[in-house]
Amino acid sequence: MATNKQRPVMTIHLTGSAHHFDEDIPFYRTITRTIYNHEHLLAFDWVEPAFVRMKRDPTDETTDWSSILEGNIEAIARADLVIIEATHYGFGQGYHAALALQQKKPVLLLSRRKDIENRLASGIRDELLLIKTYTTEAELEKIVSKFLQDNVLTNKDFRFNFFLDREIYNHLRWASFKTGKTKAEIIRQLIEREIADREEY
Amino acid sequence: MLSIHFITSRPSLENDIAVLRRIIEIIHNKDHFIAHDWIETAHKRLVDHKVGTDDWSLIYKQNLEAIARSELVIAEATYENFAVGYQVSAAIQQKKPVLILRRESADRNAFVTGVEDGWVRHAQYTDKNLAPIVDKFLDDNDIKVKDLRFNFFIDRKIHNYLRWASFKTGKTKAEVIRELLKHDIEKGEY
């Protein structure tokens, strides 16, 4: 495990199919372990609870798919990176991939089936998407580690553009003049104060 | 005349081509058209060569472009797979009304059933009720009978002008903008 105290902790969303847990669980655990070994966090810790549920009742037909989808949508929004185990090439994995790429999140799409190269996923042209096939847990760990390292958030600032109307602009100009701070510093302070005040965050 | 993007999976192409043709026929019977006419080519390729395509980049591009230019999207998702999920997600993000069709016999404990959005309608169909379901979706979303919401940013200068024009003419700001657009359309360059 390579640790670096300067490296920020990232939030990773791991998603995949829960329909084939018996064969998939070792691989999900490998991905989870690799994420933790790199000192990052899971956005949505669903794998083990879902595994317990499936073990208890393999014929469970009461799954609340709306809540599961809602949880995934929220997790993708919070995540810095998204990892999708897509060996079973399911609807949910495709749905999440489109959603994550739309939100400009780097996505690692994993499959144990080589025929993913002969499917629509292989045609997605997006520089944020990386498709990798694997066969063993060791191979999987290497792929996930490299993805995490390649996409680690640096401490560099991000550029952020947004619209503001004349009223806000005039206020910022006034506040900047009054405080001697730049307009960007004033906005950053406002956001930091909001973060500090938000108990639910 | 509406432009409809039609999504389905490879298993549906292999097993249910008659149903897919029926859906397309229903669309044509309502004087609407398919944004990207891919079903017959893909089916022939599967029957003749047992492969989907040699060029998935092109297929991806064609489908995403078809979603962008279509007014409605219909997905036959009895066999839910990655490609169907990806395209349904892309269509919802683009605020296109989506009809997700699944055979009544399809597994009800499926991820697709959790897709809930104001733009999405789910329907379980049989051979008997397929036509009324598709017809109703098309009718309910026919632009002839339904206005489209359009949001956009305006700056203070435009806002002040619209407020003034609204006061002067007794029309709403929306009516003022619609009239401007109609005049522009009438100029004949369109």
Image (cartoon, helix red, strand yellow):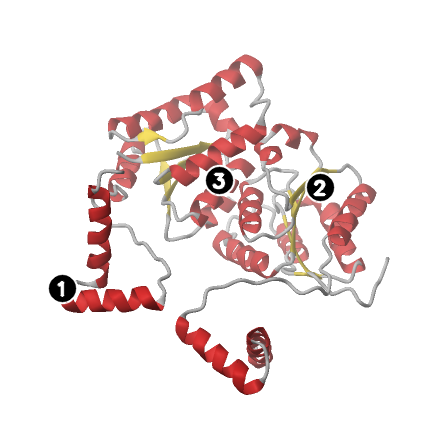
Is B28 rendered above or below residue A28? Answer: above
Specify whether residue B81 is in view. no
Residue at 67% x, 65% y: name it.
A157
At label 1, counting other C-alpha atoms closer than 10 Å, the crowd grade (few under 14, some 14-19, many 20 or more) is few
Rendered-image quadrant of the C terminus of chain A: bottom right
- Give the mark, 1 or 3, whose residue is nearer the N terminus: 3
Which chain is disc 2 placed on? A
Q: State how far apart marks 2 and 3 are (Cα).
A: 28 Å
Residue A39 x/y as whole percent: 78, 62
**At numbered mark 1, what does the secondary structure look like: helix, strand or loop?**
helix
- Above or below, B54 relative to A90: above
Residue under the point 48% across and 54% down: A66
Q: Which residue lies furthest to the top in this view?
A: B48
Q: Distance between the residues labelled 1 and 2?
A: 70 Å
The residue that disc 3 covers is B87
Q: Name the residue under label 1.
A: B169
Q: In this view, does B18 lie above or below A23?
A: above
- Identify the residue position indicated by label 2 in the image: A23
Residue B99: image tag: none
**Residue A87: % across, % down:** 66, 38
Q: Which amino acid, by three-letter code, is at mark 2?
A: Glu
User: Same chain for marks 2 and 3?
Assistant: no
What amino acid is at disc 1?
A: Thr
The location of residue A21, given as percent across then percent down, is 67, 45
Residue drawn at (82%, 68%) of the image: A5
Residue drawn at x 30%, y 66% as measured from the top left: B159
- Does any portion of residue A77 appear in the rendered image? yes
